Image: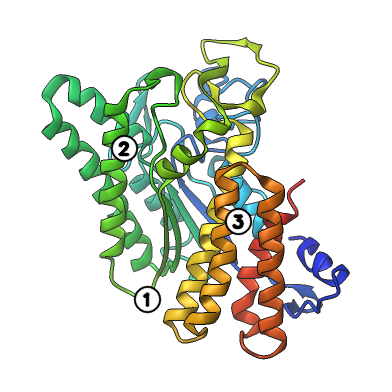
Amino acid sequence: MTIKNCGYLLLAGFLCVFFVHGICAQPYSELYVFGESLADTGNFKALFAPFGFDIPPSPPYAGGRWSNGKVYVEVIADNFDLGEVTASEYGGNNYAYGGARSTEYGYVFGVPIPSVRHQIEAFLDDVGGIADPGALHIIQIGGNDTMAAFATLGQLGWDAAIQVVEDAAEGVVESVELLADHGAVYFVVPGTHLFSVQPKFCNVSEIDALAQTFNTALEEGLAGIEGDLSIVYFNSLTFESAIKDHFIPCTPCVRFSDPSSVCDNPDDLRNWDSLGHISEAANQLIGDALTVAMLKHKVVELTVGGGLSAGRANAMLSKLEGAFGKLEDRAIAPATKKLHAFANQVNAFVRVGILPAEEAELLLVGAMGVIDQP
């Protein structure tokens, strides 16, 4: 881990109170990731390497990622000082595979791709059946299930297509419950993304409707999970709808079938490739927005738990909402200004004893992580 966030606070004239043996503590003990290509940092590539395939090809893809740089789960890891997000095929904690679905195996060239359910089972085997209650668990899934539902729509109609996405959402909820049954407490579970800005589905409203059906079923299912858990749901489709005018839609920087030709303006594009995978610039924005959503969730938890009055919580939430709105506008400098104000308020609450240092830890590390982005 690094201590860049504490360094900023000290330089700004504030006392960094989150010390463990002289350094600032991490808000989570570890990060574990499950899901599909949007979160994969090398598992698909490792799976196909023995067959002589370099998929995705690097370069121009970035080291096994389905993007030209870091994917959003790595942005979250950076923001919370959680270190590298290494693929499980290489001994790391990221179990996500490109092509994965919620509960069913996917198949690419006849090779089975572990679903989220199978990824979690592999993870539980690796940790001896005991999940770390202090770790953060991210589950990013739904894209391949939504595309399967869209294919079903053309063959069997709406009812059958809706059943596909609702079953997939139910599978994600069951996966969260499985992890919780083995000790996991902290979760981030985004919905699936906007399809109508992707090259293959440009302006196709029907697949967006299926994606939103998945997201709605997922949100409702997560809300029904019992237990003392911290679950952050994030509607990626809604966020991408808000930012779509700030990126060129539908146009890929590189064609997957011909990766030799790469555009010279990837940061202007939502799509890195012709398959609809997200550019590094868009991944950065999504990761930062998710970080802010996690901070909002923490403030709400503190309020419900009695750690903050409604008035103080509203003052904090207004700053986070402001930062989130600026991220939706892709206005990074104004967003960081709002987060500076939020961090200042958190520090003030700690100094006067309103907010315990251990409760403020996640709020400060996350906020400063977004601010400190290069």
- The residue that label 2 is drawn on is 211
The answer for how far apart the CA atoms under marks 2 and 1 are is 29 Å
Going from N to C along the chain, the mark reached first, 1 or 3, is 1
Going from N to C along the chain, the mark reached first, 3 or 2, is 2
Residue shown at the point (41%, 70%) measured from the top left: 183
Quick one: quadrant of the C terminus?
A: top right
CB contact under 8 Å: marks 1 and 3: no
At label 2, which amino acid type do we have?
A: Ala
Rendered location of residue 174, percent (x, y):
28, 56
Rendered location of residue 344, percent (x, y):
72, 72
Q: Nearer the viewer, residue 303 or 225?
A: 303
Rendered location of residue 9, percent (x, y):
80, 69
All told, the count of numbered labels is 3
Residue 83 visible to the viewer? no
Using the image, determine if residue 56 lies above or below residue 87.
above
Residue shown at the point (42%, 80%) measured from the top left: 304
Give the side of residue 318 with respect to residue 268, left or right: left
